[in-house]
Image: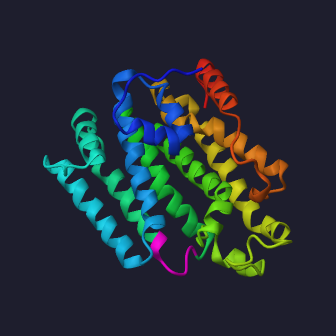
Amino acid sequence: MIEASPDTSLSDDVRRHDYDRYLCTLFAPEHRRSALIALLALNLELGRIRGRVGEPMLGRMRLTWWSETIEGVFGGTPRRHPVALALAGAVAQHSISRDALESMIDAREREFVEQGFQSFEALEQFARGTSGALHRACLTVLGVEAPKAAAAADHVGTAWALIGLVRGLPYHTRMGRVYLPQDALAEAQLSTESLSSPGAAVRLVPVLEPIVESVSRHLRQARDLRRDVPLESLPALLPAVLADAYVRELRRSNHDPFALRDESNRLLRQLRLVWASFRKRY
């Protein structure tokens, strides 16, 4: 239903692995889409590191490689890596903040802490440092510098990461990774190994419900700023529409991500975004 214009060679990868946010880039002016794709591609590269390395030290070395790559991007000497080259073009055209990209890298170091996220506050900080920073950078690409728009993008990005971590729990569990507050898991008498066991879903409710409620709170806070958010910001904020749908889906399943369908209807997601864009709402 939504037709994409030709983009960088990274588009297919982003479309396959970050389909929802890929869809949202299609509502941006054509001359800004390549830069948005570059940012989403960087986020994918950083997010893949944890699954590709077994040793925390190797993960940190890879993050250091990306830090040096960003230094080259802003120094005018980008590495011959497709994401680095795309970012170099995006930075040159749209004055993307280096701080936002470095935040995306720095926050990923928390994935290599053996004890995981000790509290919800630590998990939320991770979500803000990764996805919140990404959405703020996307806002810059869209030519928006309004502080309240940046705050709204921060809320939407944080909410998007949190709902994604809840929905991704079955996959992360299979991979032996848990993005849940350790203090809440301990109180529910759950371990990483027991998360997918019979009866775990009921005990997971008090762990997951506060995260889902936080998603809704962030979305409300983003919408409370709507009067002061320029319309040009919309492509960076449209994921809020889909996050709402995912929250409803989780609530219907009694906060059990193991009971969710593998993939929601793509056409329905497109229609939701088209309708929200037509109404100029997020």
Image coords of residue 272 (percent x, y) = 67, 28
Q: Relative to 275, say whether 36 is above or below.
A: below
Q: Is residue 152 left or right of residue 165?
A: left
Percent of width and height locating residue 53: 42, 70
Query: Residue at the spot x=50%, y=47% of the render?
Result: 154
Q: Residue 163 appears at what percent x and percent y?
A: 64, 52
Q: Is residue 163 left or right of residue 259?
A: left
Q: Quadrant of residue 105?
A: bottom left
Seen from the viewer's position, the closer of residues 173 and 101 is: 173
Q: Is residue 227 left or right of residue 68?
A: right
Q: Position of residue 199 (x, y in %)?
A: 86, 71
- Quadrant (top left, top right, bottom left, bottom right) of the C terminus: top right
Question: Height in image: 274 above or below 255?
Answer: above
In the rendered image of this protein, does residue 17 appear above or below residue 111? above
Per the rendered image, the range of residues in magenta is 111-117
**To which quarter of the image does residue 278 belong?**
top right
Our reading of the magenta stretch's main secondary structure is: loop
Say whether residue 60 is visible: yes
What residue appears at the point 13 percent right and 49 percent down from the top-left corner? 77
Where is 97 relative to 141, above or below? Answer: below
Q: Residue at image x 69%, y 78%?
A: 193
In reply to whether residue 230 is colored magenta, the answer given is no
Q: Which residue is farthest top?
A: 278
The N terminus, quarter of image:
top right
Identify the coloring. rainbow
Residue 148 visible? The answer is no
Identify which residue, 218 or 37, lies in the foreground: 37
Residue at left 78%, top 68%?
204
